[in-house]
Structure formats: C-alpha cells, structure tokens
Image (cartoon, rainbow, N blue to C red):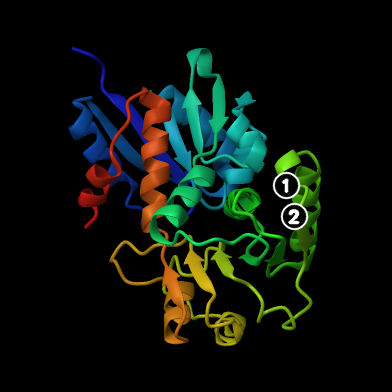
Amino acid sequence: MAKPLIFGLIGHPVSQSLSPRLHQAAFAYTGLSGEYKLFDIPPSELAKRIADLIGTGVIGFNITIPHKQALYNMVNSRSQEADRVGAINAVKVLNDGYLEGHNTDYDGLKLALAQDHPLDFAGKCALLLGAGGAALAAAAAVYNLGFAKLRVLARDPERQRAFIDFVRERQNNLAKAKHLTVIEPDQQKYWNEPALVINATSIGLTEEPQPEWMTELTGQLPPECFCFDMVYRKNGTLPTFARLAQEHGLESQAGLDMLIHQARLSFQYWTGVPVPFEVMKKAVL
C-alpha cells in the first residue's frame, strides 16, 4: 500500500482556513490516500518549524499570512511563476529536504476574476490595498488584465514605498508590463477613479473593528468599481471590505473562489493530478 501523502498549511493564524476540507475532497476524488494539516507558526519560529515539518514527512505545504515573502527567500529554488510574483504560497519538498517554491495565488486570482467578473479593464486604474505577499500576486495579475495604472495603499508608508519600488523593478523586467504605471495614492484624491479595488490585507480575517479609512474609501469609490476581497470567512459571511463595498452599493466578491482555484493548482503541483473546481467547491458549500 502506498504511503499516505501529507500536505499542510503554515501561517499565523490558520484556524480560519477551509483548505483541509478542499484537499480532503481532492483526495477523495482522485483516490489518493493523504491528509492536509494546519500548522500555526509565528514568524520567530519559522525556520526551525519548517525543518521539523520536513522531518515528520510533510511533502508539500501552502503558505499564508505572514510568511509568503519570508519563504520566498528560504527555499532552494523557485518556479517561474514564483519569480514573476516575488512571493510563494506553495512549497514542494523534494529529496533530502530540498524545497521548491511556487505561486498559485497569481493564477488563482486571475481565474476567479475571469470566472466571476469578466470585465474589460484595458486602460483603466486598479487600486491595491496591502503590501505583502498576497499583494505581490495581485500586482502581477494586474499586469495581465490590461490596466494602465496601479495605485497602492498600505498602512505602513515605509513598507508601501518598498513595495512600489519592488513592483516597479519587476515591471521593468516584464515586456508585457511596459504600459503599466505604478503610482502611490496621495491620500484621498485618487479614491474616485479605480475600476477595480483588490483587498490584499489581512483585514477581515478576524472580527476586529473595521478601520475608519476603509469605510471612507468604499464610500468614495465610483459606482462602477468592482471590489475583490482576497479574504474569505469560514462561516460564509462577507469579510470586512466586501461587506463595506456592498453596503455602499458596489459589486463585490470575497476570496473563496480564488482560494479554491489556488488549492486546485497546489494539489496538481504536488501530485500531478488535476481536480475540477466544482469538486472542491462542493466541499465548502
């Protein structure tokens, strides 16, 4: 009998994750024997705990907040998709503990937008909330959606500046992105122009009070703006940004479909076996 496959998710926190249900559905569909575990690892313990996980037989794992950029620099090699983004959310453990990093958030976001909101964004402006690993995947996706401008809004001005510089450097190395101008917001004067806003922050993961600036932002966005929240809620309720957008009459979408697409792509990356979107979607409805 083949040895059961062990996959998992590392992050801090991870208790809200639906990933175990998605991957158990994939195991059942494919007939493979395996388990998907959750590993809550604070940043201070990351390197040691990764080594421990490899020793327990984990052969593939996803990465969520706040480790996507840290793992990017820890793995032994990276896929083209990971280098395109500058962050990873999936790792394959090869022989002798060799770690290969990959990114499925990038394609997961593109697939979710194309599936649920197939609009023409050519020549328009996108606003990105956040400056972490998830935001890097969103910025890379914007390159391929035809936007003329990308603005970035982050709570930490220094981190925002570093993020914008990093994206500009990436842009200069991507022929398809020559048309894109990356511009940081100047307070509120740009809030009435985006055709798409993507929330790539952790706001909404927990029941923390909604930030005043996010309430003000959703109240000033143009009526045709589409709001995509990369956060999802395990209980099915709308996360903060998606809910605020709807309260202001804007069309919005939470991150569940993106989660499912990136999970499908991660499972295929580890096993070589594709799983239909509908199979995983049924597991969380």
Amino acid under disc 1: Ala
Residue drawn at 78 percent across, 38 percent down: 173
Q: Which residue is mark 2?
A: 180
The foreground one among 255 and 96 is: 255
From the viewer's perspective, tell me whether residue 230 is left or right of residue 1. Answer: right
Is residue 14 visible to us here? Answer: no
In this rendering, the answer to whether 47 lies above or below 206 is above
Is residue 224 visible to us here? Answer: yes
In this rendering, the answer to whether 23 lies above or below 155 is above
Q: Where, by quadrant of the figure, is residue 162 drawn?
A: bottom right
Rendered image: mark on residue 211: none
The foreground one among 184 and 5 is: 184
Residue 241: give x, y in percent of width and height: 49, 74
Q: Where, by quadrant of the figure, is residue 225 drawn?
A: bottom right
- Judged from the image, the secondary structure of the residue bearing numbered disc 1 is helix
Image quadrant for the N terminus?
top left
Image quadrant for the C terminus?
bottom left
Tell me, yes or no, whether the two marked residues, 1 and 2, touch with CB atoms within 8 Å.
Answer: yes
Residue drawn at 75 percent across, 80 percent down: 187
Residue 240: give x, y in percent of width and height: 45, 75
Q: Which residue is mark 1?
A: 177
In this rendering, the answer to whether 217 lies above or below 49 is below
From the viewer's perspective, tell me whether residue 227 is left or right of residue 177. Answer: left
Local crowd size for mark 1, using a 10 Å CA cut-off: few (<14), some (14–19), many (≥20):
some
Using the numbered discs, state the Cα–Cα distance from disc 1 to disc 2 in whole angstroms. 5 Å
Amino acid under disc 2: Leu
Residue drawn at 29 percent across, 35 percent down: 275
- Judged from the image, the secondary structure of the residue bearing numbered disc 2 is loop
Local crowd size for mark 2, using a 10 Å CA cut-off: few (<14), some (14–19), many (≥20):
many
The foreground one among 85 and 71 is: 85
